Amino acid sequence: MKKYKNSSYAANKYSKDIVYNSEVTGRTSITLDDFLKSDPSLTEADFEFWKNWSDEDYRVESKETNNQTKKDVSLTSLDKVVADFCLSLEEQYEEDECERIYLTAIREATRRFFNDESISSTTKERFRLHYINGERVLDISERHGVQSSSVCKGLKKSLNKFKGYFFLSIREIMEG
């Protein structure tokens, strides 16, 4: 919430003025009076038009940033967990042994995930498109004719299911 309150979108939305950011001057605002004084041919309707345009531009920018953040979760997000796991393994094994375990666990988790009959074919397809092929959530939602929030929720659940298979595979490899 703190990020939202400090965002350009919130600053512009809750101001009567047009607020914009400049690399040179930082955050600046244009009042209705300043706007009208800048050009005698401009009207309050012109100001409202640009204010609405600015609000929408910041809203779209904020939404795109938020969507990008959501889609940035990928199988590589497991790297930190695996790296921490591998650090303790390095005391016992060579670095290539850790990589072998990681790749084996990924392959096994992928096999289990795609063979799990409780997971719908649509969910598997969306998982493949996003996490394996790297497609954007927005593109997947448009292709399937659903809202992107629905795709995000499904991807989050399927990633958690995949992680469960991954950690199960790690444990089985280590025990056996």
Image: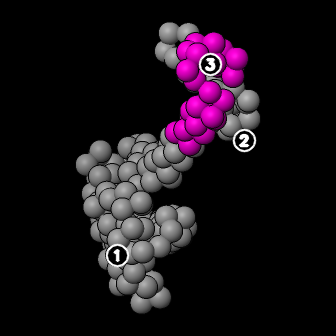
State left or right for residue 26 relative to residue 82. Answer: right
Give the side of residue 156 with respect to residue 19, left or right.
left
Q: Earlier in the sequence, mark 3 or mark 1?
A: 3
Q: Are marks 1 and 2 in contact (CB under 8 Å)?
A: no
The residue nearer to you, when weighing 113 against 121, is 121
User: Which one is in front in this view, the residue at disc 1 or the one at disc 2?
Assistant: 2
Q: Residues within 10 Å of mark 2 (few under 14, many from 20)?
A: few
* In the foreground, 22 or 124: 22
Judge by depth and name the residue closer to the eye, 42 or 31: 42
Q: Quadrant of residue 13?
A: top right
> The magenta stretch spans which residues?
29-58
Q: Which residue is mark 3?
A: 35
Label annotation for residue 125: 1
For the C terminus, the image quarter is bottom left
Instruction: Give the numbered dot on residue 1.
Output: 2
Q: Is residue 148 visible?
A: yes
Q: Earlier in the sequence, mark 1 or mark 2?
A: 2
Label 3 neighbour load within 10 Å: few <14, some 14-19, many 20+: some
| Mark with earlier residue (3, 2) | 2
Residue at 52%, 45% (x, y): give it: 60
| Membership of 77 in magenta stretch | no
Name the residue type under label 1. Glu
* Residue type at tag 3: Phe
In space, the residues marked 3 and 1 are separated at their CA atoms by 51 Å
Work out whether 89 lies above or below 162: above
* Magenta-drawn stretch, dominant element (helix, strand or loop): helix
Q: Is residue 102 above or below residue 11?
A: below
